[in-house]
Image (tube, coloured by chain):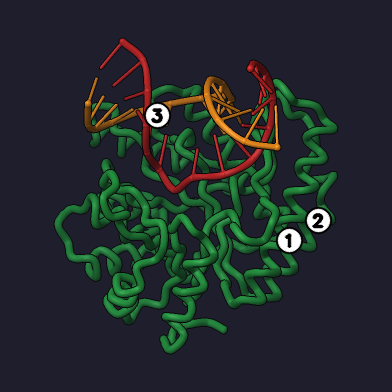
Chain colours: A green, B orange, C red
Amino acid sequence: MRIGYPCVNIGIGCTSARTFRLRSWSPERFRSTVRENLACLSSTLQFNIDHELLFFRITSDLIPFASHPVNEIDWEGEFSGSFTEIGDLIRESGMRISMHPDQFTLINSPDGGVTARSIAELAYHAAVLDAMNLDTRAKIQVHAGGVYGDKASAMDRFLDRYRDLPAEIRRRLVVENDDRLYTAADCCALSRSCGVPVLFDTFHHECNSSGEEMPEALAICAETWGRSDGIPMVDYSSQEPGARKGAHIHAIDLAHFRAFLAASRPHDIDIMLEIKDKEKSALLARAEAAADPRLAR
DNA sequence: GGAAGTCAAGTCTCG
DNA sequence: CGAGACTTGACTTCC
């Protein structure tokens, strides 16, 4: 079991998610931003290693406009040295990596243009992980997509598009239950048809389930992960009191987390804390889990 | 220097 | 029918 947080370290003083407006595009601006983002990513990973936070989600903003037509720069080649160094740091420390493209990435859209742009975006994510020489335990997580008024057709379209994906994407892609449309059971149905592993989001399950208790939902998702996929990844969060349903909590609720740890046994899982204050809560969670025999050191 | 408005991309829900 | 939400900031302009 590893514990981690997504994308950005609040306290470290840099961000690997710097970007700029399309209007400000220039090759020089692009190169300097990528250089800074990779340097910050390296610092962030070193912080994580020093604090035994061995699960990390790399931001989709790492390479700005990576899949946009304006960008014709061979960034993988130009920055291959940095990618290799970062990959070495990850592998030598036993760290696990995920990426999570944003809400515009929809492989099941009825609009072929949306799907084409989504596949280009997924190819970018796969290229980052490939450039770091990470194996197929490094994953790219997406939601099943929209419903478009007909869920059965939308799920069929997901399956068709999944089977046609380039192998570099398919071997890393996992599907995550969302808080409104596709439940863990829905995602597992997709998995039975095409083999995609299902990343279980326990907070989304609290918002939107097919009626199972959490341990059962976790169990059916865990079964979808094969040997080459690594142990199951799980997203963890809880409800921010007083906020809109589905709003992520600002700081970890340790009693809620402790209950989740107990209920998730005996599954060995990697836990991503989707909590607003990032590494601060991750450090508390790691301390809370210190006595758990599943914890990797 | 700080505040306000805006940002590549899609879809759904709510008011 | 427009705004807000999504994992959410961060950039840019305007004063």
CA gap, disc 1 and disc 2: 9 Å
In the image, what residue type sits under mark 3? Ser
Q: Residue at x 46, y 23 (%)?
A: A112
Residue A43, above or below A246:
below
Asked if marks 2 and 3 fall on the same chain, the answer is yes
Q: Position of residue A111 (x, y in %)?
A: 42, 22
Residue A167, above or below A258:
above
In the image, what residue type sits under mark 1? Ser
Q: Secondary structure at mark 1?
A: helix
Asked if marks 1 and 2 fall on the same chain, the answer is yes
Dot 1: few (<14), some (14–19), or many (≥20) neighbours within 10 Å? many
Residue A75 visible, this angle: yes
Q: Are marks 1 and 2 in contact (CB under 8 Å)?
A: yes
The mark that comes first in sequence, 1 or 3, is 1
The image quadrant that residue A166 belongs to is: top right
Q: Position of residue A40 (x, y in %)?
A: 73, 55
Residue with the mark numbered 1 = A42
Q: Camera-side residue: A19 or A161?
A: A19
Split into 4 quadrants, where in the image is the C terminus of chain A? Answer: bottom right
Q: Residue at x 59, y 77 (%)?
A: A52
Q: Secondary structure at mark 2?
A: helix
Q: Camera-side residue: C9 or A231?
A: C9
Q: Secondary structure at mark 3?
A: loop
Residue with the mark numbered 3 = A109
The mark that comes first in sequence, 1 or 2, is 1
Residue with the mark numbered 2 = A82
Q: Residue at x 59, y 45 (%)?
A: A60
Instruction: Left or right? Give the position of A214 relative to A162.
Output: left
Chain ID, mark 1:
A
Q: Residue at x 31, y 51 (%)?
A: A187
Q: Position of residue A42 (x, y in %)?
A: 73, 61
Residue A137, above or below A131:
below
